Image (cartoon, helix red, strand yellow):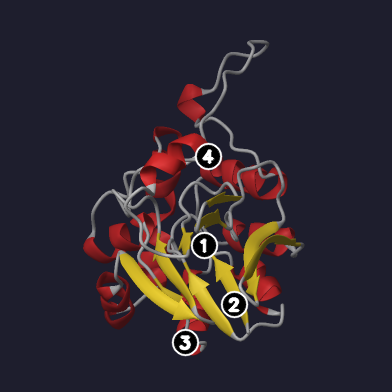
Amino acid sequence: MRILVVSDIHGNWPALEAVAAVPHDAVVCLGDIVGYGPQPAACLRWLRDNGAHIVQGNHDRALADDVAPRCRPDFEWLAAATAGIARSQLGEEELAFLRALPQKRDLVLVKQRILMLHATPADPLYSYLGPDPYRWRSAVAAVDADLLLVGHTHLPFHFRYDGLQVANPGSLGQPKDGDPRAAFALIEDGVLRLERATYPIEDTVRALQGSGLSTPAFEALASLLRTGAPQRPPAARPPEGARPARIDTG
């Protein structure tokens, strides 16, 4: 059995379409179907049509319940600038579906006990914990599973602690690790592999361009899609010639 693991799709249909072409028997989605990207309705429709096992992400909850996504400060302005895209595409039934998604989900697939969530066991929606094996060791102390699957940071990693594996497939629709290819994972015969797939990035950029975004928001998202590297929001960009500060992802 081949399990396709995706997370942080963020309305990027060309990326999802490319990854969906990878042969698989089941789909696991770790949240954030919506937010930022231009085609959230198509992404949600594909997941539902293919019987994906899904947990709620912070952007899914924000849209469904009309609350702030509580993302990193560098991305708050982009989340606000793009919120109208999903509101214009998703109807009440689809919002109810997102609202009803669980924040944690236990699965048994191919005799492997899997715990799915978006962020961390202590805070399934919001806390950021990147590829730090030492901090993850303490974060998973109470987890009773063979495999913990998480998303949220858009940074792929795979750690092993005795009988527990912890993996983040990275972001399918908005990578932030310097590699713009769509990130995902495959589990085959119990073995997890982190994977990347090329996709037509300019198709997503063109769809964003036609979504009515402001020029700063469009330019920031287009750059992120093309490079896999975040930029500062317009108000916080340093003066010309200044050395840029390190930017946290989120």
Q: Which amino acid does label 1 sit on?
A: Ser
Left or right: where 88 falls relative to 38 = left
Please, what secondary structure does the residue beneath circle 3 have? loop
Is any part of residue 132 visible from this angle?
A: no
Residue that carries the numbered disc 3 in the rendered image:
51
Say left or right for 90 vs 241: left
Q: Which residue is drawn at 72% across and 56% down?
A: 181
Instruction: Return the residue at label 2.
Output: 3
Point 58% across, 41% down: residue: 220
On the image, which quarter does residue 3 sit in? Answer: bottom right
Position above or below: 52 against 183: below
Toward the viewer: 120 or 176? 120
Task: Tell which circle, 3 or 4, labels the residue nearer the N-terminal end.
Answer: 3
Q: State left or right for residue 120 relative to residue 22.
A: left
CA distance separating discs 3 and 1: 15 Å
Q: Which is more N-terminal, label 2 or label 3?
A: 2
